[in-house]
Image (cartoon, rainbow, N blue to C red):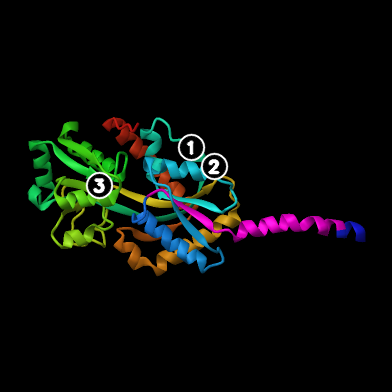
């Protein structure tokens, strides 16, 4: 027995050393958007807090492109050991399957960990467009084809504007998308007046609204956005029941142990409670939910966007 015990001990160190090395490596938070986006900012708050918690060091890895498909495909192929996680917009799972002929990954290869807040969009107009309210927006779109800025084909702004167009009964040629490389660029084009309107994530928009560089017409959620308390919702402006919101979430490769996922939900709730003011400035409602909440959100939103994509004939090649 003594010899067998010594033999087992002599064989154990390499395996233990390998395990210790893996745990000493930073956790990778793969973000599906470029630096500066709201999703990126929230991920950095999580990574910073993780370094001070029992989770340990975490690094951000931005893999933007294809509306989240690139980042999702990367994480879907990662080992399910809790060392690689994905944070992206719900649209990667609720919209992309309906508008992309090929995602490049199997959504079932990723499992929800936490819901990281939800947010509405804001219908914005450059002051020179002469649009001050929803009625003016509708009149302008009926009088001429309006160009509108988005963060890219299949982005929340693209989807929301198509949903708004369908609700208003406007012909497809009344609103023409001008896709940009991200929300920040779309806001910049709108501020510069190169594109007259857009329905965009609020993010860095409030400062431009306060300075009068952009006019906020309405927001898309059920309640007025705390970042823009004086701006009415589209429902208040004459579209009862209109409600478009998106959410951020955290996912792990399928098969990741529960023990590796659970600390992230606890951390997310702590961060959203302690950093509520900073998250609100990003235009995001600072509420974190569990895996069931994220799964429920996906299940509710996916059929809705499937219908919009079908009616609007949206397809991203």
Quadrant where the C terminus sits is: top left
Magenta stretch: includes residue 301: no
SS category of the residue bearing label 2: loop
Can the viewer see residue 163 in this picture? yes
Viewer-side label of 3, 2: 2
Picture quadrant of residue 147: top left
Picture quadrant of residue 91: top left
Q: Give the residue pinned by disc 1.
A: 105
- Residue 179 is marked as none
Mark 3 or 2, nearer chain start: 2
Can the viewer see residue 220 in this picture? no
Whether tag 2 and tag 1 are in contact, CB under 8 A, the answer is yes
Picture quadrant of residue 24: bottom right
Specify whether 198 is left or right of 21: left
Q: Is residue 257 above or below residue 105?
A: below
Residue at x 15% of width, y 35% of height: 174
Query: Which stretch appears magenta?
Result: 7-33
Q: Give the residue pinned by disc 3.
A: 241
Residue at x 30% of width, y 32% of height: 314
Q: Please tell me how crowded label 2 is: few (under 14), some (14-19), or many (20+) other residues with Cα within 10 Å.
A: some
The picture places residue 99, in percent across and down from the top left corner, at 35, 34
Separation of residues labelled 3 and 2 (CA atoms): 40 Å
């Amino acid at each position: 027995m003594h010899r067998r015990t010594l033999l087992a001990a002599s064989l154990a160190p390499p395996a233990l050393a390998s395990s210790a090395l893996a745990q000493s490596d930073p956790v990778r938070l793969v973000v599906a958007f470029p630096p500066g986006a709201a999703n990126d900012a929230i991920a950095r708050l999580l990574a910073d807090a993780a370094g001070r918690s029992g989770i340990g060091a975490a690094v951000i890895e931005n893999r933007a492109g294809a509306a989240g498909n690139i980042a999702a495909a990367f994480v879907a192929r990662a080992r399910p050991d809790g060392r690689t996680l994905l944070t992206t917009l719900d649209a990667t799972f609720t919209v992309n399957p309906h508008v992309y002929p090929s995602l490049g990954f199997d959504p079932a290869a990723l499992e929800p960990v936490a819901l990281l807040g939800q947010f509405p969009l804001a219908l914005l107009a450059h002051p020179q467009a002469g649009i001050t309210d929803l009625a003016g927006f509708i009149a302008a779109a009926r009088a001429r084809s309006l160009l509108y800025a988005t963060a890219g084909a299949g982005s929340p702004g693209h989807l929301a504007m198509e949903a708004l167009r369908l609700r208003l009964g406007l012909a497809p040629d009344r609103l023409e998308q001008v896709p940009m490389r991200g929300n920040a660029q779309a806001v910049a084009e709108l501020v510069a007046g190169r594109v007259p309107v857009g329905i965009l994530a609020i993010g860095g928009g409030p400062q431009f609204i306060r300075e009068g560089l952009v006019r906020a017409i309405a927001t898309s959620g059920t309640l007025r956005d705390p970042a823009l308390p004086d701006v009415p919702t589209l429902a208040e402006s004459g579209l009862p029941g209109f409600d478009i919101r998106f959410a951020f979430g955290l996912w792990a490769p399928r098969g990741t142990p529960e023990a590796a996922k659970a600390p992230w939900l606890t951390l997310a709730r702590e961060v959203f409670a302690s950093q509520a003011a900073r998250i609100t400035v990003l235009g995001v409602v600072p509420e974190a939910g569990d895996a069931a909440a994220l799964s429920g959100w996906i299940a509710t939103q996916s059929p809705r966007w499937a219908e919009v994509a079908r009616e609007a004939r949206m397809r991203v090649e």
